[in-house]
């Protein structure tokens, strides 16, 4: 069995584990409980909180109204070994609009507060930016390829669940560190490692999940820094995803991200998901607290 086949087999199990964590239990009174999937960080992955929020709120929305935005404000990190409760408040159910607030709780503490908006699609004005000119995913190195040799410094990333294939169209931060390159943007192709069920909420939830994987990288690469190779601390303050069109996440999407500004101990990143034909499907922003510490003296 080839290394590629082994990676696909293991990744399929990763996708199954992530999707399984999206199946929340109904606790009654619009409260849903989520299990956590395996994580390598010391606190709950923010993308998981976003994804489970999308699922919890989606359970309470009827009709053809689809999710067009989810915004989360993060107050504290969650424990990775404890279930999480999602308290949904039905703020509005109009003829074509719906709004939900979700309070994400763990052990009686508020981890984050989320707002979600739903609306029927209707004809109207349309315009969108052009997709960046990057190589197609076929022929680009796999994530395993670009992580080779970094098991010690990036072990948390090497060992993390990989529900999607990721192929960088530019050198990732840790390779830029070796070449001295400083990019103000990041381009990564992403595709689920296997087929997804037809539930639209699952497609939205998985995109929200992966939107938190590489979004902050451009803050570091703008300054020639890298996760794992530099003493960097980052924690998300807020994160928003806008869905511009009905999402079917079954093929490659280009996640094009950049950081327009950093200052005051915070960094801002923004991103866009493009389908292979150039259609803009979703946009993101994320603000984080970011600290860079000088190397330790030997």
Image (tube, rainbow, N blue to C red):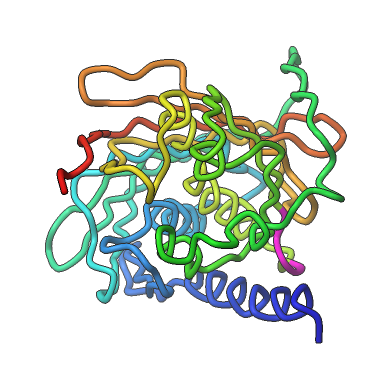
Count every numbered label the image shows and give the total.
0
Whether residue 95 is visible: no
Q: Is residue 229 magenta?
A: no
Which image quadrant is residue 282 in? top right
Which residue shows up at 37% across the image and 57% down it? 45
Q: Quadrant of the N terminus?
A: bottom right
Q: Is residue 22 above or below residue 56?
A: below
What percent of the width, then of the height, locates residue 120?
A: 65, 35
Q: Main secondary structure of the magenta part?
A: loop
**Which residue extends farthest front?**
298
Whether residue 62 is visible: yes
What percent of the width, then of the height, locates residue 148?
A: 60, 62
Which residue shows up at 44% across the image and 40% down it? 116
What percent of the width, then of the height, locates residue 296?
A: 17, 44
**Which residue extends farthest bottom?**
1
Q: Is residue 16 above or below residue 185?
A: below
What percent of the width, then of the height, locates residue 99?
A: 43, 38
Which image quadrant is residue 4 in? bottom right
Which residue shows up at 76% across the image and 68% down it? 195
Q: Nearer the viewer, residue 131 or 96?
A: 131
Q: Is residue 193 magenta?
A: yes
Q: Is residue 225 above or below residue 123?
A: below
Q: Nearer the viewer, residue 261 or 61?
A: 261
Q: Which residues are magenta?
A: 191-195
């Amino acid at each position: 069995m080839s290394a590629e086949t082994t990676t696909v087999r293991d990744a399929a199990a990763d996708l199954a584990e992530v999707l399984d964590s999206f199946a929340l239990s109904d606790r009654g009174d619009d409260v849903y409980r989520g299990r956590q999937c395996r994580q390598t960080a010391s606190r709950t992955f923010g993308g998981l909180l976003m994804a489970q929020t999308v699922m919890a709120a989606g359970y309470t929305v009827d009709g053809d109204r689809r999710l067009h935005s989810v915004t989360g404000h993060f107050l504290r990190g969650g424990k990775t070994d404890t279930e999480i409760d999602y308290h949904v408040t039905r703020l509005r159910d109009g003829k074509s609009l719906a709004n939900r607030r979700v309070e994400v709780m763990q052990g009686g503490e508020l981890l984050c507060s989320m707002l979600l908006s739903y609306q029927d699609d209707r004809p109207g004005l349309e315009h969108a930016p052009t997709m960046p000119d990057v190589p197609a995913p076929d022929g680009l190195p796999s994530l395993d390829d670009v992580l080779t040799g970094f098991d010690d410094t990036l072990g948390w990333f090497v060992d993390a669940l990989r529900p999607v294939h990721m192929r960088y169209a530019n050198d990732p931060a840790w390779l830029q560190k070796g070449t001295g390159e400083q990019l103000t943007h990041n381009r990564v192709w992403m595709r689920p490692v296997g087929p997804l069920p037809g539930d639209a909420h699952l497609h939205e939830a998985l995109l929200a999940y992966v939107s938190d994987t590489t979004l902050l990288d451009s803050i570091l690469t703008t300054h020639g820094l890298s996760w794992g190779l530099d003493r960097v601390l980052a924690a998300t303050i807020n994160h928003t995803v806008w869905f511009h069109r009905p999402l079917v996440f079954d093929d490659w999407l280009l996640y094009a991200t950049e950081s327009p500004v950093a200052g005051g101990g915070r960094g801002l990143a923004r991103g866009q998901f493009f389908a292979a034909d150039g259609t803009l499907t979703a946009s993101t922003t994320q603000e984080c607290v970011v600290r860079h510490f000088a190397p330790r003296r030997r």
